Amino acid sequence: MSEYSISKVYPSDKRGSSQIEKLLLAEGIRRDKNLDYTCAVYDDDYNIIATGSCFGNTLRCMAVSHEHQGEGLMNQVVSHLVQYEYERSINHLFLYTKCSSAKFFGDLGFYEIVRVDNQIVFMENRRTGFSDYLADLAKTRQDGRKIAALVLNANPFTLGHQYLVEKAAGENDVLHVFIVSEDASLVPFAVRKMLVVNGTAHLKNIIYHDTGPYIISSATFPSYFQKDDEAVIESHANLDLSVFVRIADALGINARYVGEEPKSLVTGIYNRIMSERLPENGIKCVIIPRRTEGGQVISASNVRQAIKEGRLEDIRELVPESTYRYFTSPESEEVVRRIRGTDNVIHY
């Protein structure tokens, strides 16, 4: 095997970035928009012949030129990225790959979490990572005839979210509320969790969970080997459901509640796939119409827009009192500053 150099590619390196774009496209991969580190392997003429990137705790956008496959370059890329992550004290790593590549990454120390046949495999570098997560969840399992679940991002927690939680809690013996713990939202996880817990404190049959690294947001789901945006959403939904079915089995969940959002492409595709796949696994999919105020659907996007524009009094009609108190307190200054400094707070 030839020895090639490997090093970081800086965003300012236009030649390197252009070569990476061409290499990825040649291997059927679109460059992901969410990347915070990229490396490349160079040949003797300083041409890029392999590349890989990281985002948070995930490895992504890895490719080797077809002219150099079989030379062990992917091993070199993965080893470099793993070392980079370890130096940042990130030891629990994940990657997404095509089904045809899963065995290769398995040989490099990654273990399959779930797969969506003919689409994607979700892997991690801990042999018992997901099973340990499920075992911890199972400790909170409670008996009941009707056991439901909700997954909330709550960015931030609104009266619409509260209505959905109240509906699910009122129709079931136990409600497991999963709060997306990935910090990819304008409102940090710690604040989102606090607002969810405070806004539902009057309900006594709720068990709260952090999603951990296994239920991921659409903001960080990889798009690099999907043919278009709709395929990305479908793959994410199918992967999310494959993970959720395992979680439901651990907790005895037999219903999942979701909010209807007719104007959202993402939610519409998610809800369609959930309504098809969940019943196949013995789980009822309950889609709840969104709560309205003044003829308008209550949306976290609208709350963020009002905060961005300094119209804090306007959110009073859209959020629980606990959420309103937070956003009008000095404690929220940093979060409010972040929202006001963001160009677009409306998500499709």
Image (cartoon, helix red, strand yellow):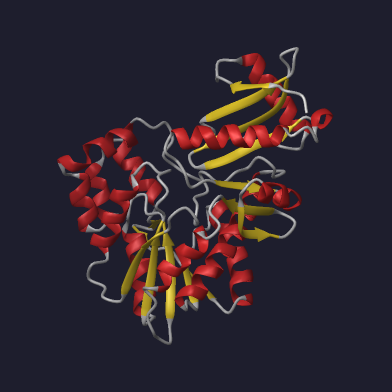
Q: Quadrant of the N terminus?
A: top right
Residue in view at x 72 percent, y 43 percent: 227
Side of 250 relative to 139 (left or right) = right
Quadrant of the rendered image containing residue 204: bottom left
* Image coordinates for residue 67, horizontal then vertical, percent: 84, 28
Q: Position of residue 268 (x, y in %)?
A: 57, 58
Q: Measured along the vertical axis of the image, is residue 185 above or below residue 278?
A: above
Residue at the top extreme?
45
Task: State which quadrant residue 177 falls in.
Answer: bottom left
User: What residue is rendered at 74% in x and 32% in y?
Assistant: 64
Q: Is residue 105 visible?
A: yes
- Indicate whether 43 appears above or below 278: above
Q: Is residue 236 left or right of residue 139?
A: right
Query: x and y percent of residue 298 in the render?
Result: 37, 56
- Outermost residue on the right side: it is 67
Q: Residue at x 60, y 21 (%)?
A: 7
Please say whether residue 271 is visible from this viewpoint. no
| Location of residue 126 in the rendering, given as x and y in whole percent from the top left corner | 53, 53
Q: Tally the numbered discs.
A: 0
User: Residue reaching furthest bottom?
Assistant: 145
Relative to 149, say whether 71 is above or below.
above
Q: Is residue 51 above or below residue 97?
A: above
- Who's the residue at 24% across and 53% down the image? 323
